[in-house]
Amino acid sequence: MGAASKESRKEVRKKLGTLKSLTVQEKTKERYKLGLTGFFDFLRAEGLKLPTKRDAMDGLVSDYLEYMWSQGEGRAAASTFMAALQDYDPKLKSNLPGSWRLMKTWSTHELPSRASPMTEAVLRAMVGWAVMHDYETFGLSLLVGFYGLLRTGELLALQAWQIHMNSALQPAVINLGFTKGGKRQGAAESVTITEKHVLSHLWAWKCRVPQHTFLTLKPHAWRSLFSECIQKLKLEGREFRPYSLRRGGRLISSSNVVVWIQYY
C-alpha cells in the first residue's frame, strides 16, 4: 500500500515539475520579469550600475521606489517589484531595511482603489458595445467572467479545452486547475455555468476554434479593450475594472443564475 502510494506520488510530481519550478506560477513569473525590467530600465536611464554587495542595494531600490511613487505607479506594481527581487535573490530581503520601510509608508498613504461590482445592466451595455463593434468574443469573455465568477487572471488564461460541454442546452463546466482557492483546499477547482444565453454563445465559440485557443486576446490587448469600452460608454467615474466582473457576479449568483464551485 505504501509503495503504491509512493509510486503514485512520484508520477504526479513528475508531471508537476520540480519544487523550485512550483514556487512561482508562470503568470507570476511574467509579472516579476516585467517588474525587474522596469528597474533595469531605470538604472540605465540614470546611469547607475548594480553594486557587487547585497547590503549596497538598499539605496538603489529605495530610489527606484521613490521614482515609482513620483510617477503615479500603483502599490501593486511596487509590491511585485519587491517580490521579484526576493525571488531572484532570496537573501536580498534582509538587506533592504530602508526599502521595506518605504513600502510600509506607501501602504499607509496609498489612495484606496477597489473595483466596483459590475451590475447586469452595465454588463449588457458592454456586451452590446462589443457586438456592435465586431468584438463578439470579447463580449463573450465578459459574460463568462461575470457569470463564472472568474478572477481576472483565470479569465485571461482560459482556453477552449478547459470548457467541458455536451451541447448548448447543458451546463458548461470550466476546469480552472489549481487556483488560489483550490490550493487552500488541496484540490483543483472548477465552476459550472447554467445561464442559457451564455451557454449558447459559448458552445458556438467552442465548436469553431482549436482546443488551445484562448477565450480572450493577449492580456494587455484585452485590458485595453475593456478600458476603451468603459470610456466609450462614459462609465469612467464608476470605478469599473476587470475584477468588477467577478465582484458583480458574486452579488447576483444567489438569485437568477446558478454557479457551482467544485473541488476535486
Image (cartoon, helix red, strand yellow):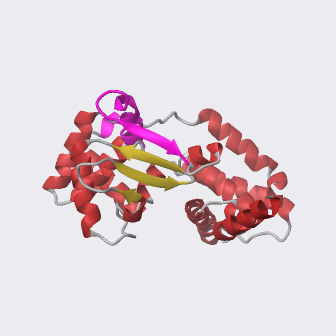
Q: How many marks?
A: 0
| Nearer to me, 131 or 258 | 258
The structure residue drawn at horizontal position 23% and vertical position 53%, both measured from the top left corner, is 168
Q: Is residue 72 above or below residue 214?
A: above
- Taking the spot 40% from the left edge, 70% from the top edge, the residue there is 212
Q: With 22 as the anchor, is 139 left or right in this view?
A: left
Q: Position of residue 160 (x, y in %)?
A: 37, 63
Residue 245 visible in the picture: yes
**Which stretch is magenta?**
236-264
Q: Identify the image quadrant of residue 117.
A: top left
Which quadrant holds residue 224? bottom left
**Viewer-proximal residue, 121 or 177?**
177
What residue is shown at x 60% (from left), y 34% (from top)? 109
In the rendered image, residue 43, in percent from the top left (x then y), is placed at: 65, 68
- Is 260 magenta? The answer is yes
Q: What residue is rendered at 33% in x and 36% in y?
A: 118
Q: Residue furthest front?
A: 1
In the picture, measured across the screen, residue 195 lies left or right of residue 14, that is left
Furthest-left residue in view?
132
Q: Is residue 116 above or below residue 188?
A: above
Q: Provide residue 250's location: percent of width, then percent of height.
A: 40, 33
Picture coordinates of residue 193, whole percent (x, y):
35, 44
Quadrant of the frame with the N terminus: bottom right
Instruction: Mark yes or no: residue 234 visible.
Output: no
